Amino acid sequence: MTAWVIQFLLGLFVANAGEWFVHRYLLHGLGQQADSFWAYYFLHRQAHCNHDWAKTYLPWHYHHHMTNDEVNWCITHPLFDYLMNTRGKALEKS
C-alpha cells in the first residue's frame, strides 16, 4: 500500500512539473510563434479564446494572463507553482 501511494504522488509531481515547464517555456516561448504547433495547444487556446470559460475552469491560468504573466504557470493544477514559488494570489470571488 505504501509503495502505491508513493508512486501515485511521484507521478502527480512529475506530471505537474512537466505541465509547468511546457506552459512556461513552450507555450510562452514557441507558442508565441504563429507557425508553431504549440500555438494550438487546446487548453491554452481555449483559455485565450474564451475568457469566461477560463475564469470558471482555469482560474489560476486566467489570473496568469489577466493580472501577472510571471506567475501561475500551471494550467490544470497549481501544485508545481507552489513548489517553484511561482503561485500568485488567488482571484477575488466576484
Image: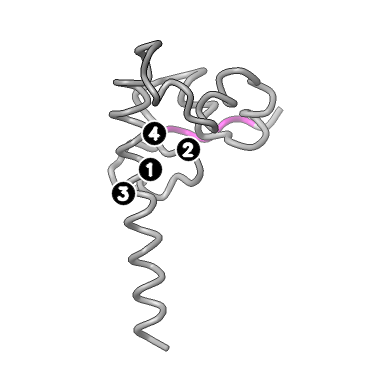
Question: Spatial distance from mark 3 to mark 1, Cα to Cα?
Answer: 13 Å
Q: Nearer the viewer, residue 77 or 82?
A: 77
Query: What is the quadrant of residue 78 in the picture?
Result: top left
Question: Which residue is pictured at 54% across the width and 26% down the height?
Answer: 62
Query: What is the quadrant of residue 38 in the picture?
Result: top left
Q: Residue furthest top?
A: 34
Type of secondary structure dominating the magenta stretch: loop
- Secondary structure of residue under mark 4: loop
Q: Which residues are magenta?
A: 88-92
Of the residues under marks 3 and 4, which one precedes in the sequence?
A: 4
For this view, does 35 lie left or right of residue 75?
left
The residue indicated by pointer 4 is: 73
Question: Spatial distance from mark 2 to mark 4, Cα to Cα?
Answer: 6 Å
Of the residues under marks 1 and 2, which one precedes in the sequence?
A: 1
- Secondary structure of residue under mark 1: helix
The residue indicated by pointer 3 is: 83
